[in-house]
Image (cartoon, grey):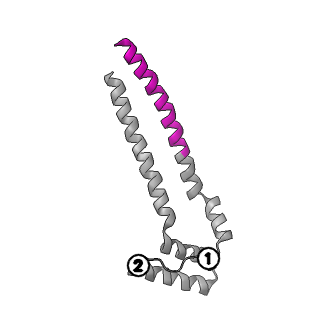
Amino acid sequence: LKEKCQMTDGEWEERQKTRQLEMEAVSKALAVLSGDDAHDLFTKTFNPAFVQVQSGAEMSSRRTEAARVLELSAKKFHSSYLSALATKVKLDAFERVKKAIDDLILQLGNEKAAEIKHKDFC
């Protein structure tokens, strides 16, 4: 029993270290994606000519209308920020990535809690 508990303790410590490294990496990735540098880079390199105008799935009418208003305002005021925002409203691509990262962080937290509970039991 002592051997099994020692082995379990060793495995638990290793998983804790790995999990901590995973959480740090995910947090860094999220910080990079949502940071000012990423936004500035996107704004500098944004070229609306390469944006997909339509997709197979229809956007909601509110989203379409909001994107249209933002595009018109961006053209009127020559604002790259409004143009980027209009594109974000249309595509909303990074929101899915951010949500996946947030879900992963939550899952890792749940696994950590389960392992702590199991370790306490042992």
- Given residues 58 and 46, the one toward you in this image is 58
Task: Decide: is 90 above or below 19.
Answer: below
- Given residues 5 and 34, the one toward you in this image is 5
Q: Amino acid at mark 2?
A: Glu
Left or right: residue 29 versus residue 104 is: right
Quadrant of the rendered structure where residue 40 is?
bottom right
| Residue that sits furthest to the top in the current view | 2
Q: Position of residue 100 (x, y in %)?
A: 45, 55
Which quadrant, please, contains the N terminus? top left
Q: Determine which of the numbered discs, if any, sits on residue 58 in the image.
A: 2
Task: Decide: is 116 above or below 92.
Answer: above
Question: What residue is drawn where x is 39% and y is 81%?
Answer: 61
Task: Decide: is 40 above or below 30.
Answer: below
Question: What residue is drawn where x is 58% and y is 77%?
Answer: 83
Residue 30 part of the magenta-drawn span: no
Quadrant of the rendered structure where residue 12 is?
top left
| Residue that sits furthest to the left in the current view | 121
Left or right: residue 66 versus residue 118 is: right
Q: Mark 1 Cα within 10 Å, few/some/many (few <14, many 20+)? A: few
Q: Position of residue 90 (x, y in %)?
A: 49, 75
Q: Amino acid at mark 1?
A: Phe
| Residue that sits furthest to the right in the current view | 44
Which secondary structure dominates the residues rendered in magenta? Answer: helix
Report the span colored magenta.
Answer: 1-25
Q: SS at mark 2?
A: loop
Q: Which residue is mark 1?
A: 50
Q: SS at mark 1?
A: helix
